[in-house]
Amino acid sequence: MLAPMSTKQASAAVTVVVGDEELLIERAIAASVGPARAAGADVRELVAAELEPGQLAEMTSPSLFGDQPLLVVREVDQAGKAIADELVAACRDAADADDARLVLVHRGGARGKATLDAALGYGARRIDCMKITKQSERIEFVRAEVRAAGKTMTDDGARALVDAVGNDLRDLAAACAQLGTDTDGRIDAALVARYYRGRAEANGFAVADRAIEGRLGEALEQLRWALAVGTAPVLVASALAQGLRAVAKVGSATQRGLRGAELAREVGLPPWKSDRVRSQLRGWNEAAVGRAVHAVAEADAQVKGGGTDAAYALEKAVMAVVAARAGA
């Protein structure tokens, strides 16, 4: 899945990471910059749309001591023409270098494709990180993660884990790592079921993520599964509330121009989590968040004794969150 691919011999100097599967992107970047970072190289992360003309050329020029930073440039597909031209020039200049100089991250698609094609034309190696959309691919991903942890997993165990955790690759990878650490021997469906009954609080966040992303069917499916394996309704309501608070905080910080590590520090979340919440902002505005928060507050009161059917209250809350997003 992460194997370099190119129509020409791969250059050691330039890597292009193509796709929209965030976990695979971060792993590809880490693998590309790891050796240079371990050797003490100056690794800098940039966002293409935030670069000023001439800034990239300045950064890619060797210092008086011959040192040159390794640049990771994200969102290359969003670069304007001037910056795109500079990126192409940097790929051309780096083509014959022996050490890593550039890692370009492109989400795929038609926008910015000329920049991507030019980089590959100069011999850049390509790492594809496209979104995993098929259930069979998620199951294979889970089995590969478990193998990497030195354990074995049955087909029914992999399917049970995907059903339990959901479709997000970060969640699946974390679950595989945890199972690899906490269990011995072969991992099958029965073991997954026992393990997750004891850790049911994690399932509320799967419900919240699906609802906030507007995926009603998946959110309701996750909710019913969570309740079926013993997740306390109050934990689901809490996860929904936390998810909406994160959307509100990240949305406000993003409007003020904060990005990356600065954004994560401002909102008090790990960088991967703030990036994920930022991707969930699409479809939301302040009024919609307010409506969703009100609906979840009502559900919270119901599951804490104000109503007689906690499952129904949570289903209503999930539908209200999705409807609020759609209404935005």
Image (cartoon, rainbow, N blue to C red):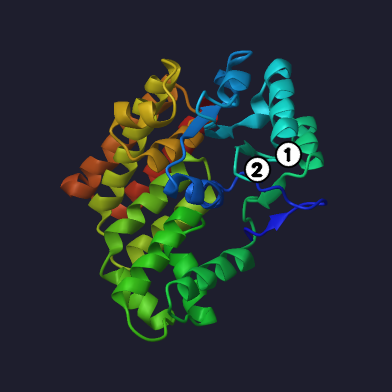
Which residue matches tag 2? 13
In this rendered view, identify the residue nearer to me: 322 or 5.
Answer: 5
Residue 219 drawn above or below residue 106: below
User: What residue is at 75 percent from the left and 32 percent from the top?
Assistant: 92
User: What residue is at 33 percent from the left and 62 percent from the top?
Assistant: 227
Residue 21 x, y percent position in the rendering: 58, 48
- Left or right: 61 as drawn, with respect to 87: left
Residue 6 x, y percent position in the rendering: 77, 52
Label 1 SS = loop
Badge 2 amino acid = Ala
Badge 1 amino acid = Ala
Which residue reaches farthest bottom?
185
Which residue matches tag 1? 95
Residue 327 x, y percent position in the rendering: 52, 27
Among the two numbered marks 1 and 2 on one chain, the one whose residue lies closer to the N terminus: 2
User: What residue is at 25 percent from the left and 70 percent from the top?
Assistant: 198
Classify 10 Å Cα crowding around label 1: few (below 14), some (14-19), many (20 and above). many
Label 2 SS = loop
The quadrant of the rendering that contains the N terminus is: bottom right
Q: Is residue 40 visible?
A: yes
